[in-house]
Image (cartoon, helix red, strand yellow):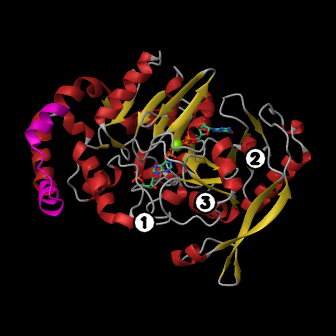
Amino acid sequence: MPGTVIVGTQWGDEGKGKFTDLLSKEMSVVARYQGGHNAGHTLVVGEETFKLQLTPSGVLYDHIVPVIGNGVVVDPFVLLKEKEMLESRGISTRRLVVSGNAHLILPYHQQLDALHERHLGKSKLGTTKRGIGPAYADKSMRLGIRVQDLLDEDIFREKLHAALGHTNKILTKVFNRLAVDPDELADRVLSECLDGVGPHIGDSIDVIHTALEAGQHVLFEGAQATFLDLDHGTYPFVTSSNPIAGGACAGAGVGPKDLNRIIGIAKAYVTRVGSGPFPTELFDAVGDHLVDVGREFGTNTGRRRRTGWFDAVMLRHAARVNGLTEVALTKLDILDQLAEVKICVAYDIDGSRVEHMPYHQSELHRATPIYETMPGWQTDLSHVTEPDQLPDAAKAYLDRLQTEIGVPITLASTGPARSQFFHWS
Ligand code: GDP
Ligand code: IMO
Ligand code: MG
């Protein structure tokens, strides 16, 4: 039963979309298992660029069944817009299946997300303001509304009344805002979304397991990343779901033994959007160079990403919590022009050398990176499709990374296009 997980190993935007698209050739089903439209996954096919927030990145292939799993939070308005965008560009979304158990993001979740951030002031998380946190909070409070509720108007209205009975008190009494009328919102959602979303609502568990039982390949496409994971990330500067590979079990309804290939996607350096600790962050010309050459601006929100050197301590931790069987390295080409490249191999915390992610986060805030510096290759790698074509310095960098991570780097990418990658170890 071949299940593959693609999981971000850093703070997101590692290139999960590119590798999901690339591996989709061999898959039958591609399923998202967590997050929502806070994700922005970029696929470059020939002259065309697709930026997907909710639809699984396998959608470009006719043979794939794209699935939005139960663990995803779905804004129905965004889903419809994305569907229209894809259809208008000649991509069929007919086969898309949205789990009836996935929860809805409604406009009041987005309003609450923005209000929470405003009230946190200096302590704000820097969320994408897509309503992710409030939608998962409602799910945990048992006040969430599920995608399947759209199919029964009475239930939908009843649940909206119950949810807003609670939320309106917060909006009006805590945040001094107007209450949301449940019936007006129900009218709007049902009239604008039901026709478009309704035909996609289905039994995602059956779709996934029928494929697995037939020996077909299923890819679970993680959004966000290990260090944005609600349990394993740099809390509270995290998202509100479990992007780690194990999240695929809960968020798509598969058992751990269905997952046999866990591919961690890692950038050849590190980026982060939003607040939170970042030991290898650069505030110098090299950091600016990585932003400029790597075009490090959010796919989704357009925000400038923070940049830093590759952090092997993070990757070793990601290897543990995800059970990585391999790593796919992206954006190696962005280091092409640098005279030297650095790898953080350990942290110095209060004078001690620490090689594993510290358990207490306050230590991570005090961690300073211990670097190993290697010569750069100063060669354009964008045309490399075979490892033999690599200059020795780039080979040495990959070898060193692999040793430090302790997991084989099987694939490396040297540009955004499908053809720009090579197999490594
Ligand atoms: P995701 O959220 O993990 O899917 O990543 P994003 O799409 O948000 O950000 C990754 C960006 O890097 C996108 O613009 C990709 O097209 C681009 N990209 C992916 N792999 C490579 C690569 O190897 N080299 C370069 N130059 N760009 C890449
Ligand atoms: P992909 O899938 C990078 C970050 C936000 C913020 C934190 C919480 O494209 O890698 P949220 O809106 O989720 O409550 O925000 O998480 N964040 C991402 N950063 N890539 C993403 O997705 C992200 N999704 C959320 O910037 O710091
Ligand atoms: Mg992204």
How far across and down, in percent of the image, does residue 180 sit?
12, 46
Q: Secondary structure at mark 1?
A: loop
Query: Residue at (29%, 28%) from the top-left corner?
Result: 197
> What's the distance in space between the residues labelled 2 and 1, CA to CA?
31 Å
- Would you say the magenta stretch is mainly helix, strand or loop? helix
> Callout 1, which amino acid?
Pro
Q: Which mark is residue 128?
A: none
Q: Which mark is residue 335?
A: 2
Q: Secondary structure at mark 3?
A: helix
Query: Residue at (24%, 37%) from the top-left corner?
Result: 148
Label 3 or label 1, whichever lies nearer to me, is 1
Q: Secondary structure at mark 2?
A: helix
For disc 3, the neighbor class at 10 Å (few under 14, some 14 to 19, many from 20) is many
> What's the distance in space between the residues labelled 2 and 3, CA to CA?
22 Å
> Callout 2, which amino acid?
Leu
Q: Is residue 253 visible?
A: no
How far across and down, in percent of the image, does residue 354 sit?
68, 77
